[in-house]
Amino acid sequence: MDAPFLLLFWGAVPFVAVWIHGASSNANALKPDLESSPAWAVAWFFIPVASLWMPYQAMRETWDTTFSTVTKADRPERDYPARWWVFWIGSGVAGFVADQVSKAHHAPAVQTLANCFWLAAVMGSILAAKSLREIIRLVTAAQNATLVDREVHKAAG
């Protein structure tokens, strides 16, 4: 099960990184003084310790900036960035615990416990992916609508 998961994960990384860079670029165009540049929004994922918080902060900036331009009625009801990050970090912690437990003891009861943590890690990864999919869908739609509005106003002005 590890190989298909890793193949899927690493196969998605370039596409998600390109999207994060583009969405962050659009957010920076809307509000140039954001803390995270598009390059840092991606790079934070690969920096130890900072990767535990900074990718969320960069995504939060992109999300907040994107939806600051729409009416309250058009804003998403759910806090998808927080949901995504909780599932992402939770799945990593569950996977780490599962790995440590499975290496420590080979008793059947302990292996059952490790399998429960693996299941939690897999479920957390699935829920993180679903939340990220919603972030991508909502931010892309909002940024496209903002771009269209700007072009319409530019043509009318």
Image (cartoon, rainbow, N blue to C red):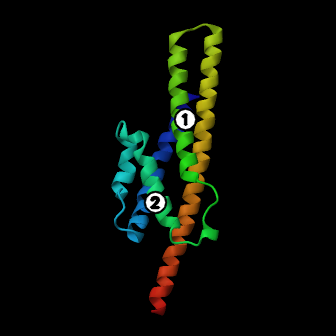
Q: Which residue occupies 63% across, 28% down? A: 119
Q: Secondary structure at mark 1?
A: helix
Q: Which residue occupies 63% across, 35% down? A: 123
Q: Is residue 26 left or right of residue 118?
A: left
Q: Which residue is mark 1?
A: 90
**Picture coordinates of residue 90 (x, y %)?**
55, 35
Residue 14 visible to an observer of this rendering: no
Farthest-out residue, front: 72
Crowd class of label 1 (few under 14; some 14 to 19; many from 20; radius 10 Å): some
Q: Is residue 115 left or right of residue 55?
A: right
**Picture coordinates of residue 52 (x, y %)?**
43, 39
Quarter in which the C terminus is drawn? bottom left
Residue 134 visible to an observer of this rendering: yes
Q: CA distance from mark 1 to mark 2?
A: 22 Å
Crowd class of label 2 (few under 14; some 14 to 19; many from 20; radius 10 Å): many
Residue type at tag 1: Gly
Q: Earlier in the sequence, mark 1 or mark 2?
A: 2
Q: Is residue 85 left or right of residue 72?
A: left
Q: Which residue occupies 58% across, 38% down? A: 125
Residue type at tag 2: Thr
118 above or below 109?
below
8 above or below 139?
above
89 above or below 153?
above
Farthest-out residue, top: 107
Badge count: 2
Quarter in which the N terminus is drawn? top right
Q: Which residue is mark 2?
A: 62
Q: Which residue occupies 34% across, 58% down? A: 37
Q: Secondary structure at mark 2?
A: helix
Q: Please tell me the numbered disc located at residue 109.
A: none
Residue 22 lies in what quarter of the image?
Answer: bottom left
**Picture coordinates of residue 105 (x, y %)?**
55, 9
